[in-house]
Amino acid sequence: MSELWVNSQLSLADWTVVGAYIAAVVGGGILLSRRQSSSLGDYFRGGNQMAPWLVMFSVIATTQSAATFLGGPDYGYRGDYSYVGSFLGSAMAAVFVAKYLIARFYALGVTTVYELLEMRFGHQAKQAAAGMYLVGRIFANGARLYMAAIAVSMMVFFNIEPASVTAAIILICLFSVGITLVGGIKSVIWSDFGQFIVYFVAALAALVSLYIQIDLSPIELIGALRDAPDGQNKLILYDFRFNVSNAFSFWAIITGVCLLSIGNFGLDQDTTQRLLTCRNAQSAGRALILSSFFAIPIVFVFVTIGQLLHIFYDRPNVFAGGNAEREFSGETITVFMSYILTQMPSGVRGLATAGVVAAAISTMTSGLNAMSSVMISDFYRPWRRQQHKVSDEAYYVRAGQWAMLIFAMALGGMGVLCFYWQRYTDMPLLEFALSVMSFAYAGLIGVFFTALFTKRGSTQTVIAALLAGFFAILVQQSYIVDLLRLPTAMRSVAFPWQLIVGTAVAACVCLMGKKQERV
């Protein structure tokens, strides 16, 4: 045991802080487990009693977590502030979802968002959409799990070798499943809130630590970022040039990024499930819109950390006390964790490390309950009632808990795959996480737009549209472009434009169905 402390980059004080955080998480889970959920409505919708402010923070934690904790600094270190500017698209999407989707979901009293399609196109259409969500969520949460594992692997094993990252993925899965099982969505939402507080406070501590070490005035710092090497201006918020390779240009933000956020907020059960726990549609819409605006200063902090890391590591000559020996030579995806483990003061380092753990746990818990709710409500319960006429709600709660275990294993496998996938593309972590979400969203957005705004479509065209959207995104991936020897220019098309193409393909396919009355 003593050897561990000698080799560890964390001091006894750091491990004490991390241990206190883990004890608090476990203790909170035990307290929540005393009020077991006896029905699916309570387990998956919290009895529609959750406060809007709490749901707002849960939505923020769900849509950010590890992707923002590591991806934000990675993006700021490499680039500018255009990712912060992308939240214009998120705000536009939040207003759209609150007006056109949330109100409809509450009016229909659904447990999952895909039940709307059942009323419009039939049971098979609902199951097809739910199945696409599950596939997409395994992709998206697997990518986030991989990012969380990078941090945990560096913290525990001090490297990001394949074996270390795989072991970290297993550790995160085991711990997260235990938290998620005990209290259903209530447990997840309260856990999200606590983890958000921890990882955001940790980010603020890292930001202050960096600013003190750099020791530049605000004016000097702004000047250094504006006049970065190679003519780069790292302060750009909106890039108005039309460039399909820029994922966060202004034109990509108001189109593809907005579409992605519509999918995330209104068609992804992972996020929408939290909104369905509010008392009514007005409260849910308010929570969603507020979350999109509150997320802006949060993301700004993480991207600014990356900007300061750029000064700290790459340009030590611009500030007093700069040391060229601190030049960062590792992979850019590890830059924030490297700073935490090697440069932050003892104790504060422990707080930042606890923030890493919080982001990692939030990544997993945010998806397991939602995926289980879709599996049980849209697949297992209808089949079980038809075959065996089982109506005991407690039985389906237990089935939902078993489903979480299955999905945890699936997410773990996807996390390992993403380790190799991201390295093949060499995309920044944020872009990688968002691009993976497009696989499911292209078909879902095309189908729901058809259902909401037209009278066309059928079960067959819904299923075909979901598949068409998925494959339209797949064929645009760099590894498929290389495999099929497609034009190399396709490799540089950013994910917002890929999503626009995929959504258009899916919508056109769905519209081929015959005209019918809308629900």
Image (cartoon, grey):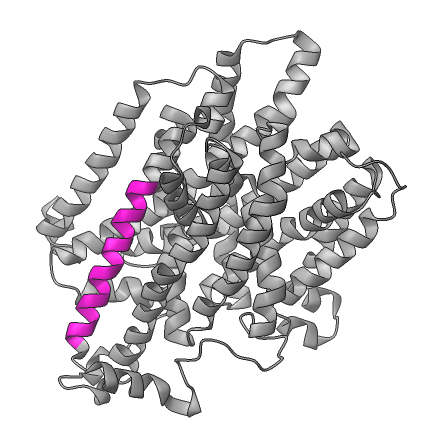
- Name the spot of residue 403 as percent of width and height, x first: 52, 27
Which residue is more in the foreground, 447 or 368?
Answer: 447
Our reading of the magenta stretch's main secondary structure is helix
Q: Is residue 376 left or right of residue 509?
A: left
- Name the spot of residue 228 as percent of width and height, x first: 36, 87
Q: Which residues are magenta?
A: 193-213
Q: Is residue 480 visible?
A: yes
Task: Residue 350: say if magenta.
Answer: no
Which residue is more in the foreground, 258 or 409?
Answer: 258
Q: Is residue 409 visible?
A: no
Image quadrant in which the N terminus is located: top left
Task: Residue 210: say if magenta.
Answer: yes
Residue located 42% across and 91% down the image = 230
Image quadrant in which the C terminus is located: top right
Residue located 56% across and 73% down the image = 250
> Which quadrant of the structure image shows residue 364?
top left
> Which quadrant of the structure image shows residue 307?
bottom left
- Identify whether 376 is placed above or below 513: above
Residue located 44% across and 80% down the image = 236
- Name the spot of residue 328 as percent of width and height, x first: 29, 76
- Name the spot of residue 406 as percent of width and height, x first: 51, 30
Judged from this view, the residue extending furthest toward the right is: 514
Q: Is residue 84 left or right of residue 9?
A: right
